[in-house]
Image: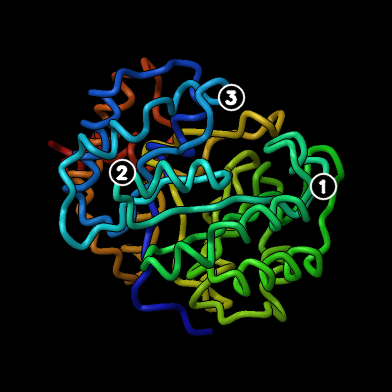
Amino acid sequence: MSLPKKVKIVEVGPRDGLQAEALTLPLETRIKLINLLSQTGLKAIEVGSFVSPRWIPQLAESERVYQGICKKEGIDYSLLVPNYKGYERALENKVTSIAIFTAASETFCKKNINLSIEESLEGFKSFVPESKKKGLRVRGYVSCVIACPYEGRISPVSVHKIVSELFSLGCDEISLGDTIGVGTPKQVHELLKNMPVSLDRIAVHFHDTYGQGLVNVYAALEKGVSTVDSSVSGLGGCPYAPGASGNVATEDIVYFLERQGIETGIDMKNLLRGADFIDGELHRQTTSKASCALRKTKFGRL
């Protein structure tokens, strides 16, 4: 078994994390969170989304957040775009990295974005090829790659088909999401087996509903994946997936990987500062086991 020597962590807390929190934070708080995360060594941070605020008020005015953050060289600051209108907003704000999203479940796709899978892919054709010509980086998300809260188990073959189509459109990277967090290492191995594209262009995105997040990350690393999504302090869930808990916490991922001798490039003390800040603003307790432990020991003193 050969594990990667280095793993890239994509921080999704400011977008995927905050969209599932009940409290809508002021712009200044969202900006400060991203600025704190920018001091940790992270190389990729999701800033927000151009989805209508009627659907996700927690991410309203993401363009102002993007304009307000202190952008650090070498960090990929991305925003989610659901359609051509969102793409136009990205261009207006000189965004250089965008993300698109669909699902491996028809029912979830319709509940999430009010489109079928095929309709979502057709919509991407209207702007993804154009965005690549303009030099933008494009990330694709596929939700419910293990199971759906409405349809149950999802076939890996169905996921592979969508991955192929997204790459044919021009996506640079595809993130595979276990949206309701029911996956196991065996299912992760099955999902990644016979993947139609190189695994160095695949990321994994696990929710920790049943406490399987870390072991599923390890399973993905065993197969050759080296990009992992996570959320500071375990923020998040999914507004369209009943029962889904937050993402795997970034602190837990960093602690786990570094103890395995796998480089992340992330400074834990600075990461804990970001986690402590957002937990205070949201009046919540962290779900990160590593964060809880490190804050009580000399290793976590700030």
Q: Residue at x 79, y 38 (%)?
A: 149
Is 14 above or below relative to 60?
below
Residue 277 coordinates in the image, percent (x, y): 24, 27
Q: Which three-letter amino acid code belongs to the residue tagged 2?
A: Asn
Is 142 above or below relative to 30?
below
Q: Earlier in the sequence, mark 3 or mark 2?
A: 3
Q: Which three-letter amino acid code belongs to the residue tagged 1?
A: Glu
What number is the disc on residue 169?
none
Name the outermost residue toward the right. 151
Q: Are marks 2 and 1 in contact (CB under 8 Å)?
A: no
Q: Residue at x 31, y 43 (%)?
A: 93
* Residue hosting label 2: 93
Splitting the image into 4 quarters, where does residue 49 fall?
A: top left
Q: Residues within 10 Å of mark 2 (few under 14, many from 20)?
A: few
Q: Are marks 3 and 2 in contact (CB under 8 Å)?
A: no
Q: Residue at x 31, y 27 (%)?
A: 278
* Residue hosting label 1: 106
The answer to whether any part of residue 183 appears in the image is: no
SS of the residue under disc 2: loop
The answer to whether any part of residue 90 appears in the image is: yes
SS of the residue under disc 3: loop
* Residue hosting label 3: 55
Splitting the image into 4 quarters, where does residue 258 fall?
A: bottom left
Q: Nearer the viewer, mark 3 or mark 2?
A: 2
Q: Viewer-proximal residue, 108 or 226?
A: 108
The Cα–Cα distance between marks 3 and 2, rounded to whole angstroms, is: 21 Å
Q: Residue at x 71, y 47 (%)?
A: 182
